[in-house]
Image (cartoon, rainbow, N blue to C red):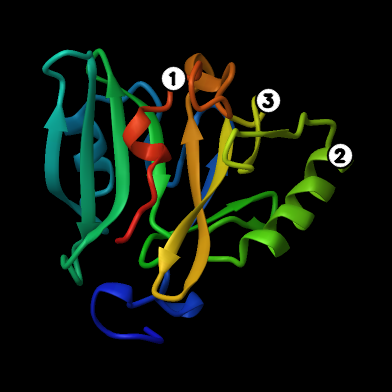
Amino acid sequence: MWKVGVWAVANEADRVQWEMLPGEGVGPLRFGMSHDEAAAAAANMLRPFVTRGGYDSPVVCSEFALVAAPIAPTVTAYYDAGRLACVAVSALRGPQVTLGGLRLVGRVPSELEDAFSEYTSTNGHDLRYSQHADPGSETLGVVLRAQRAGDVVLSRPVLVASTWAERCCDVTEGRIPAEEWRDRAW
């Protein structure tokens, strides 16, 4: 970690390595899993931290922390009608998610945007922007958000199931819950 406390950012070498499978999942998590299945699949790395939601909406949010250092959420999972539909990975301490060799977590947003733009154009994917200027792609089911890390911001990818991919970059009409569009401080 290069800082201590709430703004601690994991060293790249210390991050668990996950691969993004567009529309299918990330690391051990597969879209369509129940909360119990997701918790079991990631049990050697993550443990449930807090679960909330579902009162007026079928979307339930569940946050997971690292087993080794359960001080703050590292992965946020959103379940639609009880099935995993969206995963957001903390820029501070989350696993490193790669997409075809492109690192998505904990990067300077402008540098990642350049690399992501190159990746999408080279591989025939769309490139879209949210109303907050976050780059993303419906065909890949990803939005590259920014998250505070003290006085800097780093990349926080939000990955969605194919059922949530349409308009995933649209803050008002997409399926990603409003709370995910707010600034994150952990």
Q: Quadrant of residue 109?
A: bottom right
Question: Residue at the spot x=50%, y=16% of the render?
Answer: 173
The amino acid pointed to by label 2 is Ser
Q: Earlier in the sequence, mark 2 or mark 3?
A: 2
Q: Looking at the image, is 130 positioned above or below residue 165? A: below
| Residue named by callout 3 | 139
Q: Earlier in the sequence, mark 2 or mark 1?
A: 2
| Residue named by callout 2 | 121
Residue 153 percent across, percent down from the top left: 50, 65
Q: Residues within 10 Å of mark 2 (few under 14, many from 20)?
A: few
Nearer to us of marks 1 and 3 is 1
Question: Residue at the spot x=45%, y=76% of the render?
Answer: 151
Q: Looking at the image, is 14 positioned above or below residue 179? A: below
The amino acid pointed to by label 3 is Thr
Q: Is residue 44 left or right of residue 132?
A: left
Residues at marks 2 and 3, CA–CA distance in whole angstroms: 12 Å
Residue 85 percent across, percent down from the top left: 38, 25
Q: Residues within 10 Å of mark 1 (few under 14, many from 20)?
A: many
Res. 158 mark:
none
Q: Nearer the viewer, residue 172 or 155?
A: 172
The amino acid pointed to by label 1 is Arg
Nearer to us of marks 2 and 1 is 1
User: Residue furthest toward the right?
Assistant: 122
Q: Nearer the viewer, residue 152 or 10?
A: 152
Q: Is residue 97 left or right of residue 7?
A: right
Residues at marks 2 and 1, CA–CA distance in whole angstroms: 25 Å
Question: Residue at the spot x=52%, y=64% of the render?
Answer: 154
Residue 34 makes an appearance in the image = yes
Question: Residue at the spot x=37%, y=83% of the render?
Answer: 1
Res. 175 mark:
1
